[in-house]
Amino acid sequence: MRFGYRDICLEHDTGPRHPETADRLRAIRRGLARRHGVEYREGSLADRDAIEAVHDPEYVADVEAFCADGGGTWDADTVAVEETWEAAFASAGLACWAVNEALDGANGRRTPFSIGRPPGHHAEFDEAMGFCFFNNAAVAAQQAINHEGNGVDRAVIFDWDVHHGNGTQDIFYDQDDVFYASIHEQGLFPGTGDVDETGGPNARRTILNAPLPGGSGDDEYAAFLNGLLAPSMERFDPDLFIVSAGFDAHRNDPISRMRVSTEGYGYLTDRVRTIADSHDAALAFVLEGGYGLDALSESVGMVHEVFDGREPITPDGDVVSKAERVMDDVRDAHGL
């Protein structure tokens, strides 16, 4: 597996008590150093035009001025320093690299995973929040669609971060060529991602939200992929499949109540690969959250090991009744 990484992403300094720190990338790299077949690529900084294709240019200019003035606290959770500006362009650029690498997959390149920061899925069209300034996965998806000749007419972003990606949903809510699917913990920040949020007037049933109850784990996540995401993809038929890969639903993550195991992330990876392959869709991974350093590094390592030949254990399929009721509601909302 190939990983996109740039040292400048370490220079985005959020302070000693912030959960989203450079130690996250250091932990991932330490964990990957123990594994076979890992390669790194730097990619390039994102083009400003690519950023502004999904973000208000005035907002982008505000972030630039904020960082140039030394940064500070944008909101209670979202912090910047001067170096954040370049780090944010690097993180978005790594996501674009991952998608471009995936689209070039026919030449035998390894599956790409961008491990940049700051993360992106909470960044809305004209607002930073939730540790995020630019929406990395959205930038990469839109750039792929806008680039003529690469065969991408429809893209899906599957967000398995424990938090709902309100920013990604906001950007693509009324756009019928991007499908956004999110499985997240009910009631957790930012409080969006209800079942009945299914897309705008021009993009009906292109937003799929499954807000599962706290305590959901491998069985519930597997049921979501097999019973909801896979049939939705049969209808949408994507050319590009991006995973907004946060690992804070891990049972050992400090900021959630979900119970996904490291092995469970291996199963999710295997199923995502199968779904993407069934549509001949290029597949790329983009790092989002994950704040328990050991759980994060082990889970990213598991994704790599699946692509290196490991066969993950299939969950038992014993879904708790509260989660099953949520998924029934999703089926009704999407006619599945």
Image: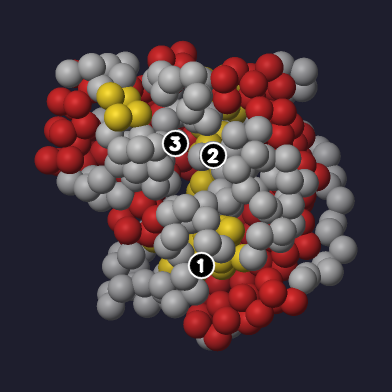
Give the labeled residue for mark 1.
209
What amino acid type is highlighted by mark number 3?
A: Pro
The image quadrant where one finds the N terminus is: top right
Q: In this view, does 73 lie above or below 170?
A: above
Cα separation between marks 2 and 1? 18 Å
* Dot 3: element: loop
What is the crowding at mark 1: few (fewer than 14 residues within 10 Å), some, or many (at least 20)?
many
Give the labeled residue for mark 3.
119
Q: From the top left corner, tell me how far across and down residue 133 is, in percent.
A: 32, 36
Q: Which of marks 3 and 1 is nearer the N terminus?
A: 3
Q: Which of marks 2 and 3 is nearer the N terminus?
A: 3
Q: From the top left corner, tell me how far across and down residue 66 is, in percent.
A: 19, 26
Q: Is residue 261 left or right of residue 333?
A: right
Q: In this view, does 149 lie above or below 300?
A: below
Is there a contact, CB below 8 Å, between mark 2 and mark 1?
no
Q: Which of 132 and 276 is in front in this view?
A: 132
What is the crowding at mark 3: few (fewer than 14 residues within 10 Å), some, or many (at least 20)?
many
Tell me if I can see residue 264 in this picture.
yes
Is there a contact, CB below 8 Å, between mark 2 and mark 3?
yes
Q: Residue 289 carries which label?
A: 2
What amino acid type is highlighted by mark number 1?
A: Asn
Is there a contact, CB below 8 Å, between mark 3 and mark 1?
no
Residue for point 31% across, 19% down = 81
